[in-house]
Image: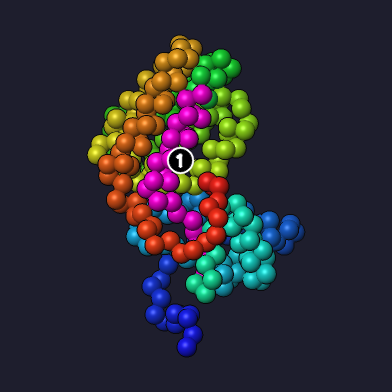
Amino acid sequence: MSDVTPVSDVTPFPRLKVPRLSVTVSLRRLACDAIKRAITEMDIYGRPGEIRLDERQLSEDLGVSRTPIREAMTVLEQEGFVRSVPRRGIYVVRKSKREIIEMITVWAAIESLSARLACEHARDDELRQLRTLFVEFDVNPSAHISEYSHANMTFHRTLIRMGGCDLMTELTDNLFIHMRAIRDVTIRQDNRAERSIVDHMNIIEALERRDADLAARLVREHTFGLAAHVERYGDHLHDVPDRPQEGPRRKYR
């Protein structure tokens, strides 16, 4: 008897929004970049159950054969974005609540140090530009929550980049897929958007005053607030208690 579930019995999975590819560049690289970008932009924690990728559908959507798709999946699995489960397929990697809190903790450490470095190295005009991210949300960020969620993540990534340490930027880029999805979900809960913008304004003020100790502390407390929220309300993040066997634990990506 076959172990493969008939296609007709499988619950439909979310479909990645991917563009058709040009044949003038390495198809494997193009496919890898397109699929990675689509995974980064999708809501991987906003629904129960795992997200399985369909190679045939991706082949049709991208306008290439399945060979560069398979090659791209191999690269993405090595980078920790997807995982292959024998006889079941390829799935987008999701983290348990414990792993999510660990990632938030690492992010807090990196971002607080970046804030300290930004006080020393960032230009005045760069710091002023942080305020422009929130100009349209001063009154009620919840009224434009999707736009505010995007501005929120842009703020945190920009702050890390302003620290001037390329390695810290690279490390947080690898965490971004999960942090973006987590912040996008939690920013809509428990009036976090209203509290978040107050925190951001206080952080920006400390940066503009070049108060490295205060900026680092405010950033750390702000991000630990996210960790505390996930610890308390994280059931919606759907822990994965019965994760299929997948070999040694991979690095966070």
Q: What residue lies at 43% left-to-right and 61% top-to-bottom?
A: 243
In this rendering, position of residue 228 left or right of residue 208: left
Q: Residue at x 37, y 20 (%)?
A: 202
Magenta segment main secondary structure: helix
The picture places residue 233, in percent across and down from the top left corner, at 27, 44
Seen in the picture, residue 177 relative to 108 is either above or below; the reply is below
Magenta extent: 89-113
- The spot of residue 33 in percent (x, y) is 62, 53
Does 91 lie within the magenta span?
Answer: yes
- Say which of 253 and 115 sits in front: 253
Reply above or below: 98 against 133: below
Q: Is residue 136 visible to us here?
A: no
Q: Could you say where residue 110 lies in the image, as x and y percent from the top left?
A: 51, 30
Q: Which three-letter amino acid code belongs to the residue tagged 1?
A: Met
Q: Which quadrant of the structure image shows residue 75?
A: bottom right
- View extreme (left): residue: 190
SS type, badge 1: helix
Q: Dot 1, how many residues are within 10 Å of its Cα: few (below 14), some (14-19), or many (20+)?
A: many
Residue, disc 1? 103
Foreground: 107 or 59? 107
Q: Is residue 40 left or right of residue 26?
A: left
Percent from the top left, x then y, of residue 123? 57, 17
